[in-house]
Amino acid sequence: MLLNASGCLDALAAPDVARSLDAFVTKTVTPEPREGNEPTRIAETDHGMLNSIGLQNPGRERFLDEVLPRLRELGIPLWVSVGGFAADEYAETCARLDDVTVELNLSCPNVDEAPESAAAIVAACRVSTPLPIYAKLSPAQPDIGEAARAVQAAGADGLSLVNTIRGLELEPATLRPRLARGVGGYSGPALKPIALAAVYAAFRATSLPIVGMGGVQTGRDAAEFIAAGASAVAVGTALFADPGAPARIRRELAETAASLGAAGPEDLCGIAHQPDFDPLPPTLTTSKTPAFQAN
Amino acid sequence: MLRRDRHSVVAVEPVGPYTLLRVGRGDLEPGVPGQFFMLEAPGRVLPRPMSLSLAPPGELGFLFEAIGPGTNALAELDAGDRIGILGPLGNGFRLDVDRPLLVGGGIGVAPFPYLSQSLDRPGAILGFRTSHHAEAAELVPNAEVVVEPTRVTELLEPGYDVLACGPAPMLSAVRELAPEAQLAWEAPMACGYGACYGCVVEVGGHYKRLCLEGPVLAA
């Protein structure tokens, strides 16, 4: 299953690109409208990019009244990225949603306000909605496995790993920050090993399905996330360079799976945790493939 | 339908200190002058937004200044290399004007050769840092050229439909003198098609995506 990373696609501006995914993940919705951060908001680095958008969005009411109905017309499964600055704000947005998967943005690196603990927010949302809840976590924490166990215990149905990690780029001529806000969220190819490590750790720590993301540019990258334990993969920065990236990655992923002797990408799930698989035996079964097939 | 296809480089030519990149058009439409394309910069994570400079038969031409890793990568392309191109994107200049006058500064003259052709060679006022940079004016017919410290606004007279492109301080100065001008702005862009929210500019008190609302905006 292939998704976009939240904030990396506007399905209303590019509906065909959204339809090339198995589900569309919205930009994060906060209770109040947000103008976002002052420009300059993006900067390319040698091996990735920084963004400092700052959760620009029309706010919960306009999202529910104006945006969500138009998204439904696209006819594809929707994931709504929910943000806030206190557990009850997240919970109230969740309570107002229906017929979507919820992704809780617990880890935006571009806003000042520090939310409550991820587990406390998940617990509040678990009470307010029966919808599937994915917790999107930051890679910038000492023990991803512990964080994953905490949100599972609080009632999360899945994990989205990972959000961007904070980074800084300086203007060569002035040695001043290129982003108006100074630091931003670092994404792209440089994030991939960090994201893979997070997926790998979370797969060992919990039984939750994982959406893996962070620097996915090719089908081979997607296969690596699945091997590390992801049951779905999201594309972010690669979408900026090429709106055709999802279709290409899907095709390459099937080719990669076939070249490894697997019947399909889902057969690769978790094999990074199994030693000495060369080649894959025909009877390979994995313990965790639910979301990849169910969705 | 957004589709990035690969197109062959025909030639890479110097124009003063600038670079003119000519690529085979394939089935790409040139679009309206002032619209832009996202050009794959080999080896870089993000493509680069470029307005179309020239649209001769079978080709698209992009004029730019090689000042960073992306534009340098584009300047180092050879004939026969292939790069991904997405476009045309955004909103270009309105061409239903009675007395057009092109006002540009520096690499902001990039869209003017194609714009001039579309408007039947109107007058133009072009400003540059040095006489070397001013060689780019050869691509724009009927141009009056000034070099710093003279500014384009010193030659700007009332009574024209101004179409302007250049650095932000120049556009702001033009706006003071020509409140009805059409202004083509520039901003760093990751995607060019509304996905990233990186290129916002303030319009009517709100941050709007320049790639969708612009890059040409009413003054």
Image: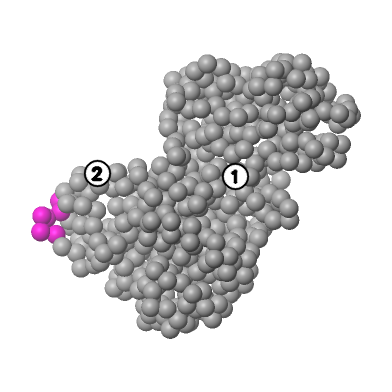
Judge left or right: residue B137 versus residue A49. right
* Residue A279 within the magenta-colored segment of the rendering: yes
Labelled disc at residue B212:
1
Residue at image x 71%, y 51%? B202
**Residue A270 at x, y = what percent?**
25, 62
**Residue B139 at x, y = what percent?**
68, 17
Judge left or right: residue A23 versus residue A288. right
Question: Residues under labels 1 and 2: Cα distance?
Answer: 36 Å
* Residue A283 within the magenta-colored segment of the rendering: yes
Q: Which residue is mark 2?
A: A255
Give amino acid for label 1. Answer: Leu
Q: Is residue B38 above or below residue B63?
A: below
Write down the quadrant of residue B165 in the picture: top right
Q: Is residue B66 above or below residue A284?
A: above
Judge left or right: residue B154 versus residue B188. right
Chain assignment, label 2: A
Residue situated in front as seen by the camera: B94 or A284: B94
Q: Quadrant of the N terminus of chain A?
A: bottom left
Residue span colored magenta: A278-284
Judge left or right: residue A145 versus residue A261. right
Determine the secondary structure under disc 2. Answer: helix
Residue at image x 59%, y 44%? B212
Q: Residues within 10 Å of mark 1 (few under 14, many from 20)?
A: some
- On the same chain, marks 1 and 2? The answer is no
**Residue B218 at x, y = what percent?**
73, 41
| Predominant secondary structure, magenta span | loop
Residue at image x 44%, y 25%? B27
Residue situated in front as seen by the camera: A59 or A134: A59
**Residue B215 at x, y = what percent?**
65, 39
Viewer can see residue A149: no
